[in-house]
Image (tube, rainbow, N blue to C red):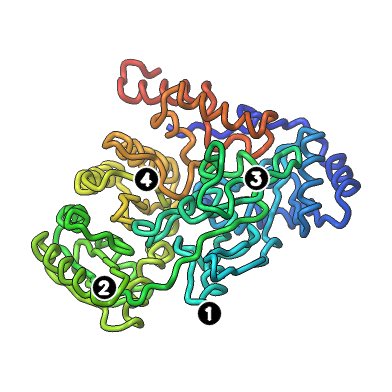
Amino acid sequence: MNILYDERLDGAAPQLDKTAIRDSLAQDVPGLTLLHREEDLHPFECDGLSVYRTLPMLVALPETLAQVEQLLKTCHRLGVPVVTRGAGTGLSGGAMPLEHGVLLVLSRFSRILEIDPEARIARVEPGVRNLAISEAASPYGLYYAPDPSSQIACSIGGNVAENAGGVHCLKYGLTVHNVIKVEVLTIEGEHMTLGSDALDAPGFDLLALFNGSEGMLGVVTEITVKLLPKPETAKVLMASFDDIEKAGNAVGSIIAAGIIPGGLEMMDNLAIRAAEDFIGAGYPVEAEAILLCELDGVEADVDDDCETVRRVLEAAGATGIQQARDDAERALFWAGRKNAFPAVGRMSPDYYCMDGTIPRRELARVLKGISDLSEQYGLRVANVFHAGDGNMHPLILFDANTPGELDEAEALGGKILELCVEVGGTITGEHGVGREKINQMCAQFRPDELATFRAAKAAFDPTGLLNPGKNIPTPARCSEFRTIKSAAADPAKQG
C-alpha cells in the first residue's frame, strides 16, 4: 500500500544547479558554513525515522539571525526548497531533507537568552535542548513541563514544529500549551512575532497554528516558554495487570474518579520485559501490562490521591500495586518508561515506532485490535504509550534485511493508524505527520479539509518552498491512496 515519495509532486524543483546555488549562498551570506561534499552530507540524510533517507543537496549551518534571514531571501529568489532541522530526533521524517533543496540546521542557535523567575518565563533559541531549559530554571525552583522521552537531546525548536508532548502532558499540556511567544522568519526573510508576553494576544491565534506546523510555515528563531514551580512532592504508583484490557479500562476509571495524574503511562508485557532487561527498573516481568501513575502537588493532597488511585486500581483488577519508596525509585520507574524505545530496539534488528491518539474509552478495544493486526501480519508489536491522554506508541518489530518485512511493517502501521481514526482518534499525537503519515492524512481528512490546510500553507509560503512534500497530501496522492485501498478491500477491482 505504500506510495513512493516523489518530492516533485509537492512543489519542489529538481532542475536546480547545485554549484550555482552554492556560489550564490556563499556570496550572499558571508561566513555561512555550507556543506556540499557527499561524506559531509550523510549525517543529515534522515531524522529519527531512519527507514527513509535522502542526501540533501546542501547543508547550511548558520550562526547568526542575519545569516538565516539572508539564506531564506536567497533561496526564495532562486526558487530553492528549504527544510529546517533541529536536533534530528523527530520520528516522522519531518526533517528528512530534499535531494534538490537546502537543509537549514539550527543546532548552533543554542543559547538560553533569559530566565525570568518573577514572570516565570524563559526566552531561548531554537537549538536549546528541552532538558536544558529545566536545568537552567532549576535554581529558581522552576521547570519546563513538556518532557518528551528524547528530552536529553531534542531541541525546543523541533518541539514547537511537532507540538511535542511527553509523559507529563496529561496534566501540564503539550508544547502548544506551554509556549507563549515565538519569533519567526518567513521564506521571504520577513520577521514576525506570534503570541506575546501577556496572557493573550490580539487577532487570530497564529501561535497555536504555528505549533505543530512542521516547518511548513516559517523558521522559528526564538521561543518564549512558560516555567512552572516544581511540585512540593511527587509520588508514583506502579500497578500490574494480568490482562491488558483491564489495564486499559483502569485508565478511564482513574480519570473518572476526578484524579488528573501528573503522568499516566502504560506498557505491555513485551515492552516491560525489554525495559527491565535494559534498565532494571524493578518492573514485574510476568505482568501482561503495567500502569505508572504519578501524582504531584501538596503532600497532603498527593497522599489522599494515592489512596484514591490505589482503591480504583484494586477495583479495576490490578494484581499488584507498588508505590515508589523514595525519589530514587521514582526516577528508576520513569527511567524504564523513558528508555522503552531503545530497550525494544535491543530485541529486534529494526522497529517502527507509530504515533496515534484515541479516546481513552477506546483503549481496550484498540489494544485488542492491535493484537489482532499483529497476528495477521506476523510481526510483534510492543505497546508503550501515554495512556492518560490516549496517545499510543505501538512499536512494530521487524528485520529490514528480510525481503518484504519493511513493507509489511509499514502496512501494519497504516492499519493501526486507520484503526485510531475509526474509533474517533487521530493519526498522530506528538510525532507529527511528516513523511511517514502523509498517506493516512487522506484517511483522516476530507478533501475540503485538506484544501483548508493548503490555503493556510499558501498564506505563509505562497511559493511552497518550506518543507515541501510533507504533512499535507496533494489531491492526486489521496486519489491514488483511496484507489489502492478500494482495490485491496475488493479483490474484483484488482488487476
The residue under label 2 is 283
Front of the two marks 1 and 4 = 1
- The tag on residue 139 is 1
State the SS at label 4: strand
Looking at the rendered image, the quarter that the N terminus falls into is top left
Q: How far apart are labels 4 and 2 at the CA level?
A: 25 Å
Give the SS element for disc 1: helix
Q: Which residue is drawn at 29% across and 55% down?
A: 387
Q: Residue 72's image quarter?
A: top right
Q: Nearer the viewer, residue 433 or 413?
A: 433
Quadrant of residue 118 within the rendered picture:
bottom right
Res 82 seen here = yes
Q: Distance between the residues labelled 1 and 2?
A: 33 Å
Pointer 4 residue: 356
Reading the image, the residue beneath label 3 is: 97
Which label lies toward us, 3 or 1?
A: 1
Q: Where is residue 112 in the image (x, y as percent from the top left)?
A: 64, 67
Q: Which residue is at a point 16% across and 63% down the rendered structure image?
A: 241
